[in-house]
Image: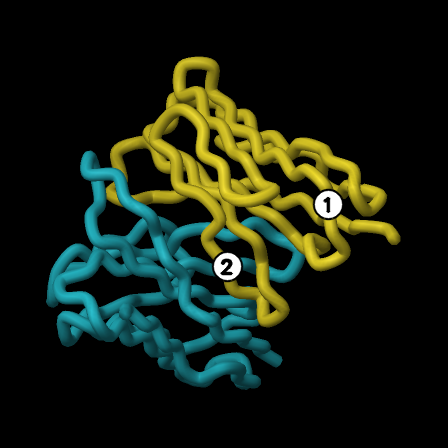
Chain colours: A cyan, B yellow
């Protein structure tokens, strides 16, 4: 069975500090991976997606970056947090993407508060 | 602009009754997913549809790509059905890009 983990569960950070959020997928090889973000009271929106190791596409510009150092790992980071980065971050995976339609499965999420 | 309009934003149902949630799309979508938010804020998969209808227990979903809408029907609502439900549609050129609705907060009343 596939499992998806995100860390940390929650984080309180200062404006201007760095951030690194992690996501790992176990039990599935070569998944498509996605990062989503939801501001408090906002709608969930996709930030990044990756179809393979080392390849990441940006969907929305939020002064964040993402990397996929391993097949089962997706990292979201920034060197300088903004207040507007607060919110809920979700990682998701799917088996296929693009024209091969497929269900996306979401991780437990990381709640971030920037002060 | 917003590509997914979800309605209603909030819904109260008496136990045992039913209703429907709806998502309208401003453009043609390839597929739709319905989710329910769990207590931690993450998303539980309910349905994935590329066309037609699917049913699971007291939930039934339909997706019409041509008419640009999807629905989620809940029948015989139970207290534990209370929560926030989201639709998300896949469309456009970006791989696996899901466009989320704003959600429907469902409250089931005893």
Asked if residue B76 shows in the view, the reply is yes
Q: Chain of mark 1?
A: B
Name the spot of residue A2 as percent of width and height, x first.
Answer: 28, 69
Q: Sort mark 1 into few (<14), some (14-19) or many (20+) by Cα contacts within 10 Å.
A: many
Name the spot of residue B38 as percent of width and height, x first.
Answer: 59, 64
Secondary structure of the residue carrying tag 1 is loop
Residue at 61%, 48% (x, y): give it: B85
Secondary structure of the residue carrying tag 2 is strand
Residue at 57%, 77% (x, y): give it: A114
- Tag on residue B55? none
Name the spot of residue B48 as percent of width and height, x first.
Answer: 39, 41
For residue A80, which quarter of the picture? bottom left
- Tag on residue B43? 2
**For the residues carrying marks 1 and 2, which lies nearer the camera in this image?**
1
Q: Are marks 1 and 2 on the same chain?
A: yes
Residue linked to disc 1: B77
- Nearer to the camera, B65 or B48: B48
For residue B54, which quarter of the picture? top left
């Amino acid at each position: 069975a596939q499992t998806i983990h995100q860390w940390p569960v929650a984080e309180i950070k200062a404006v201007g500090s760095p951030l690194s959020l992690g996501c790992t997928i176990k039990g599935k090889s070569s998944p498509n991976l996605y990062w989503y973000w939801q501001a408090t009271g906002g709608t969930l929106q996709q930030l990044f997606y990756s179809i393979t190791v080392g390849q990441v596409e940006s969907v929305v510009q939020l002064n964040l970056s993402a990397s996929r150092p391993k097949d089962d790992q997706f990292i979201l980071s920034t060197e300088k947090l903004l207040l507007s980065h607060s919110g809920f971050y979700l990682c998701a995976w799917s088996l296929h993407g693009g024209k091969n339609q497929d269900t996306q499965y979401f991780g437990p999420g990381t709640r971030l508060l920037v002060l | 602009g917003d590509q997914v309009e979800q309605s209603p934003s909030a819904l109260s149902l008496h136990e045992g009754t039913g209703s429907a949630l709806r998502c309208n799309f401003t453009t043609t979508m390839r597929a739709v997913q319905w989710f329910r938010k769990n207590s931690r804020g993450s998303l539980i998969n309910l349905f994935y549809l590329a066309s037609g209808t699917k049913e699971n227990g007291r939930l039934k979903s339909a997706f019409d790509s041509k008419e640009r809408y999807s629905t989620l029907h809940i029948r015989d609502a139970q207290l534990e059905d209370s929560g926030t439900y989201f639709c998300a549609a896949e469309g456009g050129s970006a791989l696996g890009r899901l466009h989320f609705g704003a959600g429907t907060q469902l409250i089931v009343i005893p």
